[in-house]
Protein backbone atom coordinates (compact mmCIF):
# COMPACT_ATOMS: atom_id res chain seq x y z
CA UNK A 1 0.00 0.00 0.00
CA UNK A 2 1.44 3.35 -1.06
CA UNK A 3 1.19 6.06 1.55
CA UNK A 4 2.49 9.09 -0.27
CA UNK A 5 1.14 12.46 -1.24
CA UNK A 6 2.20 14.20 -4.45
CA UNK A 7 4.74 16.86 -3.38
CA UNK A 8 3.65 19.08 -6.26
CA UNK A 9 -0.17 19.15 -6.16
CA UNK A 10 -1.02 17.30 -2.92
CA UNK A 11 -2.94 14.48 -4.61
CA UNK A 12 -3.26 11.52 -2.20
CA UNK A 13 -3.31 8.82 -4.92
CA UNK A 14 0.17 8.42 -6.49
CA UNK A 15 0.74 4.96 -7.96
CA UNK A 16 3.86 2.82 -8.56
CA UNK A 17 5.13 3.87 -11.98
CA UNK A 18 8.59 2.41 -12.52
CA UNK A 19 10.84 0.02 -10.63
CA UNK A 20 14.49 0.54 -11.54
CA UNK A 21 17.93 -0.78 -10.50
CA UNK A 22 21.00 1.24 -9.55
CA UNK A 23 23.42 1.19 -12.46
CA UNK A 24 26.59 2.16 -10.59
CA UNK A 25 26.74 -0.98 -8.45
CA UNK A 26 26.04 -4.61 -9.06
CA UNK A 27 23.89 -4.69 -5.89
CA UNK A 28 20.58 -5.83 -7.36
CA UNK A 29 18.75 -3.18 -5.30
CA UNK A 30 15.66 -1.73 -7.00
CA UNK A 31 13.92 1.58 -6.42
CA UNK A 32 10.30 2.52 -7.05
CA UNK A 33 9.23 5.78 -8.60
CA UNK A 34 5.64 6.94 -8.00
CA UNK A 35 3.60 9.00 -10.44
CA UNK A 36 0.81 11.40 -9.59
CA UNK A 37 -2.34 10.68 -11.61
CA UNK A 38 -3.47 14.30 -11.35
CA UNK A 39 -0.39 16.35 -12.33
CA UNK A 40 1.98 13.69 -13.77
CA UNK A 41 4.85 14.43 -11.37
CA UNK A 42 7.23 11.45 -10.88
CA UNK A 43 9.08 11.04 -7.59
CA UNK A 44 11.02 8.42 -5.66
CA UNK A 45 8.94 6.56 -3.09
CA UNK A 46 9.52 8.64 0.09
CA UNK A 47 9.94 5.41 2.06
CA UNK A 48 13.36 4.88 0.39
CA UNK A 49 14.27 8.49 -0.26
CA UNK A 50 16.59 8.66 2.74
CA UNK A 51 18.95 6.16 1.08
CA UNK A 52 19.82 8.82 -1.44
CA UNK A 53 21.72 10.65 1.26
CA UNK A 54 24.47 8.05 0.91
CA UNK A 55 25.42 8.73 -2.65
CA UNK A 56 28.30 10.97 -1.79
CA UNK A 57 30.14 7.92 -0.48
CA UNK A 58 29.55 5.93 -3.64
CA UNK A 59 32.02 6.10 -6.49
CA UNK A 60 29.32 7.45 -8.79
CA UNK A 61 30.09 11.11 -8.37
CA UNK A 62 33.75 10.34 -8.30
CA UNK A 63 35.93 13.37 -7.92
CA UNK A 64 38.97 11.71 -9.39
CA UNK A 65 39.92 13.23 -12.72
CA UNK A 66 37.96 11.48 -15.48
CA UNK A 67 39.64 9.24 -18.04
CA UNK A 68 40.63 11.28 -21.11
CA UNK A 69 40.73 14.44 -18.97
CA UNK A 70 42.81 16.14 -21.67
CA UNK A 71 39.95 15.80 -24.16
CA UNK A 72 37.09 16.33 -21.70
CA UNK A 73 38.54 19.54 -20.16
CA UNK A 74 38.17 21.72 -23.29
CA UNK A 75 34.75 20.16 -23.98
CA UNK A 76 33.55 21.11 -20.46
CA UNK A 77 34.81 24.65 -21.09
CA UNK A 78 32.71 24.83 -24.24
CA UNK A 79 29.62 23.43 -22.44
CA UNK A 80 29.93 26.05 -19.69
CA UNK A 81 30.24 28.84 -22.26
CA UNK A 82 27.10 27.47 -23.91
CA UNK A 83 25.28 27.55 -20.54
CA UNK A 84 26.33 31.18 -20.06
CA UNK A 85 25.32 32.08 -23.62
CA UNK A 86 21.82 30.65 -22.91
CA UNK A 87 21.54 32.64 -19.66
CA UNK A 88 22.74 35.91 -21.22
CA UNK A 89 20.51 35.51 -24.27
CA UNK A 90 17.46 35.17 -21.98
CA UNK A 91 18.61 37.89 -19.54
CA UNK A 92 19.31 40.51 -22.26
CA UNK A 93 20.77 43.04 -19.77
CA UNK A 94 24.21 43.73 -18.36
CA UNK A 95 25.62 41.12 -15.95
CA UNK A 96 24.43 41.36 -12.32
CA UNK A 97 24.46 39.08 -9.27
CA UNK A 98 24.25 35.37 -10.10
CA UNK A 99 23.61 32.49 -7.69
CA UNK A 100 24.34 28.90 -8.79
CA UNK A 101 22.69 26.31 -6.52
CA UNK A 102 24.59 23.00 -6.68
CA UNK A 103 27.62 24.68 -8.26
CA UNK A 104 29.84 21.57 -8.00
CA UNK A 105 33.48 22.39 -8.74
CA UNK A 106 32.45 25.88 -9.89
CA UNK A 107 33.39 25.67 -13.56
CA UNK A 108 30.21 27.44 -14.73
CA UNK A 109 30.49 30.10 -12.02
CA UNK A 110 34.12 30.80 -12.95
CA UNK A 111 33.06 31.19 -16.56
CA UNK A 112 30.26 33.63 -15.53
CA UNK A 113 32.62 35.60 -13.28
CA UNK A 114 35.09 36.01 -16.15
CA UNK A 115 32.22 37.50 -18.18
CA UNK A 116 31.52 40.14 -15.51
CA UNK A 117 28.89 38.49 -13.28
CA UNK A 118 29.09 38.86 -9.50
CA UNK A 119 28.97 35.18 -8.51
CA UNK A 120 27.93 33.14 -5.50
CA UNK A 121 27.59 29.35 -5.28
CA UNK A 122 25.89 26.83 -3.00
CA UNK A 123 27.51 23.39 -2.74
CA UNK A 124 27.33 21.06 0.28
CA UNK A 125 29.76 18.39 -1.03
CA UNK A 126 33.18 19.16 0.39
CA UNK A 127 35.21 17.51 -2.36
CA UNK A 128 33.43 19.77 -4.88
CA UNK A 129 33.33 23.10 -3.03
CA UNK A 130 37.03 22.81 -2.12
CA UNK A 131 37.89 22.95 -5.82
CA UNK A 132 35.50 25.88 -6.38
CA UNK A 133 37.00 27.83 -3.48
CA UNK A 134 40.68 26.83 -3.64
CA UNK A 135 41.19 26.43 -7.38
CA UNK A 136 38.81 29.07 -8.78
CA UNK A 137 38.67 31.44 -5.79
CA UNK A 138 34.87 31.48 -5.80
CA UNK A 139 32.52 32.43 -2.97
CA UNK A 140 30.56 29.30 -1.99
CA UNK A 141 28.02 28.63 0.81
CA UNK A 142 28.71 25.11 2.01
CA UNK A 143 25.82 24.46 4.42
CA UNK A 144 22.54 22.93 3.20
CA UNK A 145 20.09 25.58 1.92
CA UNK A 146 17.96 27.38 4.48
CA UNK A 147 15.01 29.76 3.97
CA UNK A 148 17.02 32.67 5.40
CA UNK A 149 20.22 31.86 3.52
CA UNK A 150 19.84 35.03 1.42
CA UNK A 151 17.83 38.22 1.81
CA UNK A 152 14.88 38.77 -0.56
CA UNK A 153 15.80 40.30 -3.93
CA UNK A 154 19.51 39.38 -3.63
CA UNK A 155 20.10 38.13 -7.20
CA UNK A 156 19.31 39.00 -10.80
CA UNK A 157 19.77 35.37 -11.96
CA UNK A 158 19.59 32.03 -10.10
CA UNK A 159 20.68 28.84 -11.88
CA UNK A 160 20.18 25.17 -10.94
CA UNK A 161 22.06 23.00 -13.47
CA UNK A 162 20.93 19.44 -12.80
CA UNK A 163 20.39 20.10 -9.11
CA UNK A 164 16.60 20.21 -8.69
CA UNK A 165 16.15 16.47 -9.33
CA UNK A 166 18.42 15.76 -6.31
CA UNK A 167 16.51 17.98 -3.85
CA UNK A 168 13.84 16.38 -1.60
CA UNK A 169 11.43 19.33 -1.80
CA UNK A 170 11.77 21.10 -5.18
CA UNK A 171 8.65 23.21 -4.57
CA UNK A 172 10.08 24.68 -1.37
CA UNK A 173 13.45 25.45 -2.99
CA UNK A 174 11.86 27.18 -6.00
CA UNK A 175 9.66 29.30 -3.70
CA UNK A 176 12.85 30.46 -1.99
CA UNK A 177 14.52 31.11 -5.35
CA UNK A 178 11.53 33.25 -6.34
CA UNK A 179 11.97 35.27 -3.13
CA UNK A 180 15.73 35.66 -3.57
CA UNK A 181 15.32 37.02 -7.11
CA UNK A 182 14.73 40.68 -7.88
CA UNK A 183 11.51 41.62 -9.72
CA UNK A 184 11.97 40.58 -13.33
CA UNK A 185 14.83 38.26 -12.25
CA UNK A 186 15.54 35.04 -14.10
CA UNK A 187 15.50 31.45 -12.81
CA UNK A 188 17.21 28.81 -14.96
CA UNK A 189 16.69 25.12 -14.26
CA UNK A 190 18.11 22.19 -16.19
CA UNK A 191 16.61 18.75 -15.44
CA UNK A 192 16.19 15.36 -17.14
CA UNK A 193 13.01 14.98 -19.21
CA UNK A 194 11.11 11.82 -18.30
CA UNK A 195 8.84 12.40 -21.32
CA UNK A 196 11.87 12.15 -23.66
CA UNK A 197 12.34 9.61 -26.40
CA UNK A 198 15.43 8.17 -24.65
CA UNK A 199 13.44 7.73 -21.42
CA UNK A 200 10.75 5.88 -23.38
CA UNK A 201 13.37 3.65 -25.06
CA UNK A 202 15.33 3.03 -21.86
CA UNK A 203 12.53 2.56 -19.29
CA UNK A 204 14.22 1.47 -16.05
CA UNK A 205 17.61 1.51 -17.84
CA UNK A 206 17.39 5.15 -18.99
CA UNK A 207 20.76 6.74 -18.21
CA UNK A 208 19.28 9.90 -16.66
CA UNK A 209 16.79 8.04 -14.41
CA UNK A 210 19.62 7.47 -11.91
CA UNK A 211 17.91 6.09 -8.78
CA UNK A 212 18.20 6.69 -5.87
CA UNK A 213 20.04 9.99 -6.45
CA UNK A 214 17.38 11.49 -8.69
CA UNK A 215 14.46 12.00 -6.31
CA UNK A 216 12.18 13.76 -8.81
CA UNK A 217 11.56 13.50 -12.53
CA UNK A 218 9.87 16.16 -14.62
CA UNK A 219 8.11 16.47 -17.94
CA UNK A 220 8.06 19.89 -19.64
CA UNK A 221 4.53 20.29 -18.25
CA UNK A 222 5.23 19.33 -14.63
CA UNK A 223 8.40 21.48 -14.55
CA UNK A 224 6.46 24.44 -15.94
CA UNK A 225 3.63 23.97 -13.45
CA UNK A 226 6.14 23.77 -10.57
CA UNK A 227 7.55 27.14 -11.65
CA UNK A 228 4.21 28.88 -12.18
CA UNK A 229 2.90 27.58 -8.84
CA UNK A 230 5.94 29.24 -7.19
CA UNK A 231 4.97 32.59 -8.71
CA UNK A 232 7.08 32.60 -11.90
CA UNK A 233 5.80 33.55 -15.33
CA UNK A 234 5.25 30.70 -17.83
CA UNK A 235 8.78 29.45 -18.63
CA UNK A 236 10.47 29.01 -22.00
CA UNK A 237 11.61 25.40 -22.46
CA UNK A 238 14.69 24.39 -24.52
CA UNK A 239 15.65 20.85 -25.41
CA UNK A 240 19.02 21.42 -27.12
CA UNK A 241 21.62 20.37 -24.53
CA UNK A 242 24.69 18.67 -26.07
CA UNK A 243 26.32 18.39 -22.65
CA UNK A 244 24.08 15.46 -21.72
CA UNK A 245 21.58 14.53 -24.44
CA UNK A 246 23.85 12.72 -26.92
CA UNK A 247 25.66 10.79 -24.19
CA UNK A 248 22.31 9.95 -22.53
CA UNK A 249 20.98 8.48 -25.78
CA UNK A 250 24.12 6.41 -26.50
CA UNK A 251 24.42 5.05 -22.95
CA UNK A 252 20.68 4.28 -22.76
CA UNK A 253 20.75 2.28 -26.01
CA UNK A 254 23.86 0.38 -24.84
CA UNK A 255 22.11 -0.41 -21.53
CA UNK A 256 19.09 -1.66 -23.44
CA UNK A 257 21.22 -3.90 -25.66
CA UNK A 258 22.51 -5.74 -22.60
CA UNK A 259 26.05 -4.36 -22.29
CA UNK A 260 27.35 -3.92 -18.74
CA UNK A 261 25.06 -1.15 -17.28
CA UNK A 262 26.37 2.40 -17.71
CA UNK A 263 29.64 0.97 -19.03
CA UNK A 264 30.86 4.16 -20.73
CA UNK A 265 29.90 6.39 -17.82
CA UNK A 266 31.43 4.14 -15.15
CA UNK A 267 34.58 3.92 -17.25
CA UNK A 268 34.83 7.69 -17.74
CA UNK A 269 34.29 8.28 -14.01
CA UNK A 270 36.69 5.45 -13.06
CA UNK A 271 33.89 3.92 -10.97
CA UNK A 272 35.21 0.38 -10.47
CA UNK A 273 32.11 -0.75 -8.47
CA UNK A 274 30.01 -0.48 -11.61
CA UNK A 275 32.37 -2.25 -14.04
CA UNK A 276 32.47 -6.01 -14.77
CA UNK A 277 34.66 -7.68 -12.16
CA UNK A 278 36.56 -9.91 -14.59
CA UNK A 279 39.00 -8.44 -17.11
CA UNK A 280 37.74 -10.78 -19.86
CA UNK A 281 34.14 -9.55 -19.43
CA UNK A 282 35.31 -5.93 -19.48
CA UNK A 283 37.33 -6.42 -22.69
CA UNK A 284 34.45 -8.29 -24.35
CA UNK A 285 32.03 -5.49 -23.43
CA UNK A 286 34.40 -2.81 -24.71
CA UNK A 287 35.02 -4.53 -28.04
CA UNK A 288 31.26 -5.00 -28.49
CA UNK A 289 30.53 -1.35 -27.67
CA UNK A 290 33.26 -0.08 -30.03
CA UNK A 291 31.99 -2.21 -32.91
CA UNK A 292 28.40 -1.14 -32.26
CA UNK A 293 29.25 2.56 -32.04
CA UNK A 294 31.41 2.45 -35.19
CA UNK A 295 28.42 1.12 -37.10
CA UNK A 296 25.64 3.21 -35.59
CA UNK A 297 26.98 6.58 -34.39
CA UNK A 298 25.38 8.64 -37.19
CA UNK A 299 22.00 7.04 -36.45
CA UNK A 300 22.36 7.66 -32.69
CA UNK A 301 23.22 11.32 -33.29
CA UNK A 302 20.29 11.67 -35.64
CA UNK A 303 17.93 10.14 -33.05
CA UNK A 304 19.17 12.62 -30.40
CA UNK A 305 18.72 15.64 -32.66
CA UNK A 306 15.30 14.36 -33.71
CA UNK A 307 14.10 14.01 -30.10
CA UNK A 308 15.38 17.53 -29.34
CA UNK A 309 13.74 18.93 -32.48
CA UNK A 310 10.29 17.45 -31.66
CA UNK A 311 10.44 18.67 -28.04
CA UNK A 312 11.30 15.29 -26.50
CA UNK A 313 14.99 15.92 -25.65
CA UNK A 314 16.63 13.75 -22.96
CA UNK A 315 17.16 16.80 -20.75
CA UNK A 316 15.67 20.30 -20.86
CA UNK A 317 16.43 23.84 -19.75
CA UNK A 318 13.62 26.04 -18.41
CA UNK A 319 13.98 29.81 -18.18
CA UNK A 320 11.38 31.53 -16.00
CA UNK A 321 11.07 35.14 -14.92
CA UNK A 322 9.79 36.49 -11.64
CA UNK A 323 7.01 38.92 -12.63
CA UNK A 324 8.08 42.56 -12.70
CA UNK A 325 7.13 44.77 -9.72
CA UNK A 326 3.40 44.82 -8.93
CA UNK A 327 2.39 41.91 -11.17
CA UNK A 328 3.34 39.20 -8.65
CA UNK A 329 0.75 40.32 -6.08
CA UNK A 330 -2.07 40.13 -8.59
CA UNK A 331 -1.45 36.44 -9.41
ZN1 LIG B 1 0.44 15.80 -8.40
Image (cartoon, helix red, strand yellow):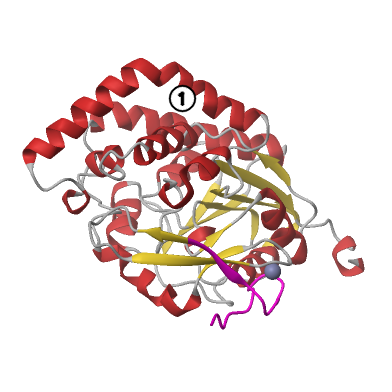
Q: Is residue 9 magenta?
A: yes
Query: Would you place residue 244 above or below residue 3 in this image?
Result: above
- Mark 1: few/some/many CA within 10 Å (<14, 14-19, 20+): some
User: Residue sitting at 24 percent across and 57 percent down?
Assistant: 25
- What residue do we see at 20% from left, 30% from top? 286
Task: Name the residue at 69% across, 64% down.
Answer: 178
The percent coordinates of residue 241 (x first, y second) are: 54, 35
Highlighted range, magenta? 1-18
Q: Is residue 204 above or below residue 148?
A: above
Quadrant position of residue 60: bottom left
Q: Quick one: quadrant of the C terminus?
A: bottom right
Left or right relative to 275: residue 179: right
Residue that badge 1 annotates:
300
Residue 88 percent coordinates (x, y): 64, 37
Q: Which residue, as the protein is rendered here, is positioned at the far right?
A: 330
Q: Position of residue 135 (x, y in %)?
A: 29, 47
Q: Is 12 positioned to the left or the right of 29 in the image?
A: right
Helix, strand or loop for disc 1? helix
Closer to us: 141 or 255: 255
Q: Nearer the viewer, residue 174 or 135?
A: 174
Q: Quadrant of residue 57?
A: bottom left
Asked whether, in this view, residue 122 is left or right of residue 311, the answer is left
Please state the horizontal and vertical placement of residue 3, each as a whole percent of the image.
56, 83
Let me know if residue 2 is in the magenta part. Answer: yes
- At 25% across and 42% down in the image, what residue appears? 260
Relative horizontal placement of residue 295, taking residue 121 as reference (left or right): left
Ligand 1 placement by image quarter:
bottom right
Q: Characterize the magenta stretch by its predominant secondary structure.
A: loop
Amino acid sequence: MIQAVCPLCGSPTPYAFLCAPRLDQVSGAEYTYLRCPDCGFVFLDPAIESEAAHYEESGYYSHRPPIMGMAIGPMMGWFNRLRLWMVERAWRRSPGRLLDIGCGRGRFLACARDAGWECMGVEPMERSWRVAVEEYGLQVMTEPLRDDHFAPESFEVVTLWHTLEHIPDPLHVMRNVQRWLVSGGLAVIAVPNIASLQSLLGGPLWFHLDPPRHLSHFTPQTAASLLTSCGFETPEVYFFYPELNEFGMVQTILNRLGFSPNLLFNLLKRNRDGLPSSKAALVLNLVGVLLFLCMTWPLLLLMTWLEEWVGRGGTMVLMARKPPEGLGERQ
